[in-house]
Every structure is written in structure tokens, then in C-alpha cells.
Amino acid sequence: MVPPVDSSPAATVRAAPNSDGGTFADGIRSRWWWLGLAAAIIAVVLALLWTGATAVAQLADPGAFTRWGLPVATTIHNLALSAVIGALVFAVVILPKDRKSHRPHTGKAKVAPAPNVPEHPAFARAMTLAMVAGGVWTFSAIAVLVLTYSSISGLAVAGNADYSNMLVFFMTELPVGQAWLMITILAAVVTTLVIGLRNISALAVPLVLALLAFVPQALIGHSASSADHAGAVNSLFLHVTGASLWVGGIIALVVVSGVLGKITAQTLKRFSALAIFAFAGVTGSGIINAAIRITNWHDLFYSSYGQLILAKFAATVVLGVIGYMHREWIIPRLEGGKGGAGGNTRRLLWQLIFVELLIMGAVSGLAVGLSRSAPPQSRELVQESLSPAEILTGYPLPPELEFSRWFTEWRMDWLWVAFAFLAGAAYLAGMMKLRKRGDKWSVLRSVSWFAGLLSLVYITSGGTAVYGAVMFSAHMVEHMALMVIAPLFLALGSPVSLALQALTPRRDGSRGIREWILVLVHSRYSKVITHPLFAAANFSGSLILFYYTPAFKLAMTYHVGHELMIVHFTLTGYIFVQSMIGADPLPKRAPYPLRLLLLLATMAFHAFFGVSLMMATGLLNGEYFGNMGRPWGDGALVDQQTAGGIAWGVGEVPTLAIAMGVAYMWSKSDARETKRKDRAADRNKEAELGAYNDMFAQLAARDATTTNRGPALPHLPKAKHDAGQPTSGAPGAEHSTDVSSTKDSTEIGGPDTPDATQGEAN
């Protein structure tokens, strides 16, 4: 029996098999970990000195403690948050939980947990890192909150009642204070959950909560005040999310390096796959975000702010080169594919990862220095000079809507552009893996998937998005397209089926993407939201709940509300289409007649909703659309009535196409059932038909016997019905019974069987 594993940091360090700590042959010893933090602190100090961001303020200076303490606290906060995310990612999707290898539980059947199975030391160390980093994240978030107020107010940190009251007002009333208060609460909740949870499914909850902490950070970031507010917020969110996954993964890899042992190669390979997408996201979003803040080449090369961006970009490229070396040279040798995994390979592996740790620490420090420095050109909006459209939407009023401008006006929503890029790349990777394995994948499904991604990009970034922000009718086009058109193509692409075929099942107890897909498909939540009745009710009822509640105003007023609207209606439409005509696995599918009935009910509900808008005499969200100040186009009420017609027409046509698809699938199902029965008949030489014919032959033979002898009365006793005759048990009754029985049967049955009587006469 294997003894239990002590997951404390000291125990895991002692357990690390490291014969020569100075050569990095068996991992990175703990005394080297802190150099990454030191590199970050040094980088942020140099960045602040280079840009002069810590100079004494002329009007209200909070003091040297705040000027220097806030960037340092922010650096520690960012690294701690990244460490929490990296540790949880390793625990949830990369590392095996137990020492004993086994197929992970996917939720399809209830399996009793194996008793007394010790945790894998790498998993235990990752969870220890998550707990320690979670505590640091919580306290550093509090420090950033207090120091941010000190920096904005120009007051030195104090402990008197007036300062405390003003700090409370800052946290509860001002957006920046509310954002950092939310981050602090999330940090405390995540840390508490990490301490108390060990179940892999449950650990996904604090991971999602930790990722949500980037939303308020993106909303209050430096670029959020630029002219392209939505683009800046989305690109910054993608940037910090990708950077934290990458940096946190390296931190977690360094911490567990000494106890990986035989799973070093597979761990590095799994993290490398994640790092590729993180690198692409960080690089692309960083370029976009820098382009929003720097508008010309001169500022990029000759301003201190632009020079820091160039240094950060150069360091990112170096990290990408090191990652390429891992994937193309080191991992194959660790797996034995190119010469075996000797001590020199392992030593070089951990040396490169240690260099990555130092570079990433420095890049994190540069990022904090950039966030504390002002861009060379401030493009912040001046409220007094804004038009009504700019006040309401954050953007100038677009030109008058013409047919061509549906395709020429663009405002990129980088969040959905990134989603389309990553989803398309993953789909292509799955197709290539199937083709390399010799399997085929439907071309029509592939075309449908990429058509759905392109339509999603157009709906969220093209003319529908630009004019949907200022016109109810264009907004309705965007809404209906999100609910029906894009989900129709995406569902027909069958991405879940492709993933289940392309991904290799894991057998070491860890959960990869394939295992998590199966967990979600077989979960109770999936059984509820994908149930045909719920999917249809959600698809139809969401219209009422959205437009006739404050949700409509929140979606049009706030950027986060708008993005949540896109997520909700896209997923709602996808689940509904998937339950009707999709090919991906679902817990329960409705029979074809019920599907057609639900589609007819949905069409009727859309018609009712459209007519209600067309006949309305009051504006929905009138303070928004009624105050847009458009000098062109119909008035707000007429435009709303036009939106009702669009909701009716645009919603009906795709739904009718789905109904035709259900009818076609129904006919194909019947044809398949007929072919199945024909093949079964061919295999057993039509045994069922032979048995059927034999049954009728036996019935015919029995009828012939009955015709010759007359019908018998099965309920009559063998004794004669005449009380004066002897019973069958009397002496000499056998002969008498035969004659009398035949006579009685003929007399009784004759009148009721004319055919038999006629046969006898003939």
C-alpha cells in the first residue's frame, strides 16, 4: 500500500528527486523560484524610471509610498493572480489527480471513488501553489484598492475616520473603486474555494471565477478611455487573459518541476498546446491594443511609451522562439522520438523554462510600467463636445443607412474575432488529425462551420453591429441573425462530434478537453438546457424576457451587457438548432413529430412577438433610441415597428428551413429503418417473414380441421349436456361420448357457421 502524500511545500520540496540542484537535471529548486518575482520588480522600477511615471505630482501628490508602492503591489497582484490561474489549469486539465492511472470519470455513470488513493505529488503541489498564491492575491488586491484611492485622491494613506469614510465612498460609488472591490471579493472567494475543494469538477468553479477577475480590470484599464472604447476593452481583456494563462502556466510548471518524474513529457506537451493559443492571443491583442493607443510610427519609435511596447514585443517574440524549441526539439526527445531523453535534454529543458520565468517576470513588470504611464497622445473623449450618439454609444453617428453600407461599415469586435480565429484553428487541427489518421470528415460540415464563424464575425463587427447601436430595426436584424442564422451553420458543423473523434482519450486520470466535453454532455445542467421543451421555451421566451425587462437597456447602455447579450442569444439559438437537426451527442432528443410541433409553436410565437412590436404605440428603451438624434431615417417609433416586421420575417424563414430539415431527417430515418429491416431479413433468410407465414399456415390448418369436425366448445365439459346420459367416467361411456359430442357440436355450431355447413353439403 502506498503511503499518503504530504502536500505541504516543505514535504514536496524534500520529495523532489534532485541529485544535482545546480544543473537543473531534475527540475528547478525552490530557491530559484523567487528570481522571477525579482525580475518583475526590477523591470517595473526601470520602466517607471524610463517613463517618469513616478515623478512628484504638481497638484496633489500622494507621497512616495503610493507612487512606488502602487506599481509594486500591482505587479505582485498580477503575478499572484496568474499563479492561481496557472495552478488551477494544471490541476483541472493537465495533471493527473491520483498516483494510480485510470480513465477519468466523465459523468456517464456513477462511479464510487476509490478509497485510500493518494494524490499525485504534482497535483498536490499545484494545489498548494493555488492556495498560497490565492492568499497573496487577496491581500495584494486590498493593497491595490487602498493605494489606488490614495493615488486618485492625492492623499497619503492614513488611518483616520475621514480617510476611511472617503475610501468607502470610493469603493461603493466610483467605477474604479467598484472594480477593485469586485476583484478583492473574487480573490477571497476563489482562495476559500481552493482551500476547501479537491474534486476536479468542483475546481473548475474557482478557475472560472479567477478568469472573470479580468473583466473589471479591462474595463478600468488605460486604453478603456480611448476613442474605440469597446475595441480597447476587448483587446485588453484578451491580452491579460492570454498573458495570465501563459505566465501562470510557466509558474506552475516551475513549481511542480521537481515531482513530475515520468509524466514530464506529457505535462510539457499538454501545456505547450495551451501556450500556442496563449501566444497567439497575447501577440495579436497586444498589437491591436497598442495601435489603439499609438496612432503613428514616430510615437512608437521615439516616445518612451512606444519604446516600452517595442521592448515588450521583443521579449514576447523570444518567448515564442523558446516555446517553439520546446515543441519541436525537446518534447520529441523526452518522448523518445528523436534520440531519447537523456540527462542533457532534461537539463536544457529546465534551463529554458527558468529563462522563460525570468523573461515573463520582466514582461509583467513592463506591462505594469505601461499601465502607470500615459500614452504619447491622449485621445480621451471630452464630454462637452460629444453628440447625442457619442454620449449614448461612445462612437460618432454613422452615415445614413444605405444598402451598400450594410457591407462597408465595420467596427471590429475583437472578442468575437478572436473566438472565430481560435475556433477555426481548433477545427482545422481536428480535421488534419483525422486525415492524418486515415479518417474522413464531411466537407459540408466543414463549410457550414466556417460559414457560421464568418457570419458571426459579420454580425458582431459589420454593418449590423454599427447600425444596430443606433437603430432598433438594425438591432433586430443583428438579434435575429445571432439567434438563428449563425447558430444554424455552427450547429450543422458538428464541432463536438469532431472533437470527440479527433481527441485521444486520456488514461492517466487527468481530464482533457475530450473528457470535459463528455462531463458537460452528461451533466444534469446539460440535460436541462438541451431538453427539447426547455430549449424551445428558452428560444422563444428569451425575446420577451429581454425586450420587456431592464435587460434590454443594460445591453444597449453597457459594453459588458452587450457582450452578454451576444453570448446568450448565440448559445440559445445553437442549443435550439442542435436539439432540432444537430448531429452532436445530446442527453435526450425529441421524436420527429414533437420537433415539428415545437417548431410550429416557435414560429407562432415569433409572429406574435413581431406583431406586438408592429402594433405598439410606445417606445421600448425610449430614453436610448428616442434620444439618438439621427437626422436621417425613420423616427424611433416607426423604426421600432419596422423592427417588429423584421422579427417576424427574419425569424420565420430560418425556422421554416429548420422544419424542412426535420422533415427530411424524419424521412431519412424511416428509410434507414426500412433498410435495417431488409438487411436483417437478408441475414436470417427472412426468418421473420417465414415465421409469419407459418403462423397463417397453422391457422389455416386449424380452420380446415374445424370445418371437417365442426367447431368445438372449449368451455363445455366432456360430459353430455343431456342429464339423462351417463358421464364420461361411467362404464362404456367412451364410445357414447364420442358420438354424442360430435352430434352436439354439429347441432350447436351449425347455425353459426354457414360456410362450414355449406362445405359439408357440397
Image (cartoon, helix red, strand yellow):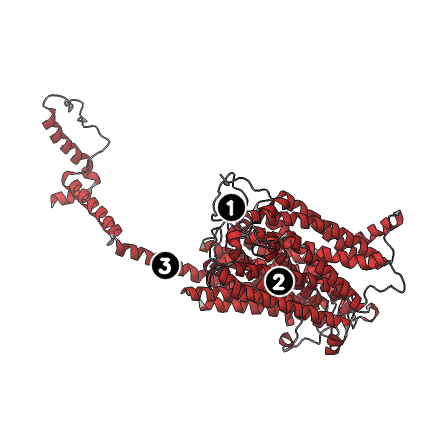
Q: Are marks 1 and 2 in contact (CB under 8 Å)?
A: no
Q: Are marks 2 and 3 in contact (CB under 8 Å)?
A: no
Which residue lies at the image location 43% right of the left edge and 62% below the top edge?
664
2 or 3: mark nearer the eye = 3
Residue 57 in the image: state x and y as whole percent.
Answer: 87, 64
| Residue designated by label 1 | 99
Near mark 1 (Cα within 10 A), the count class, few <14, some 14-19 or many ≥20, is: some
- Which disc is residue 672 wearing? 3
- Which disc is residue 417 wearing? none
Residue 545 in the image: state x and y as whole percent.
Answer: 65, 55
Which residue lies at the image location 77% right of the left edge and 62% below the top edge?
45
* Nearest to N terminus: mark 2 or mark 3: 2
Near mark 2 (Cα within 10 A), the count class, few <14, some 14-19 or many ≥20, is: many
> For the residue labelled by badge 1, is the local secondary structure a helix, a strand or a loop?
loop
At label 1, the amino acid type is Arg
| Residue designated by label 2 | 610
Position of residue 519 in the picture relative to residue 674 (left or right): right
Front-most of 443 and 215?
215
Q: CA distance from mark 1 to mark 2?
A: 59 Å
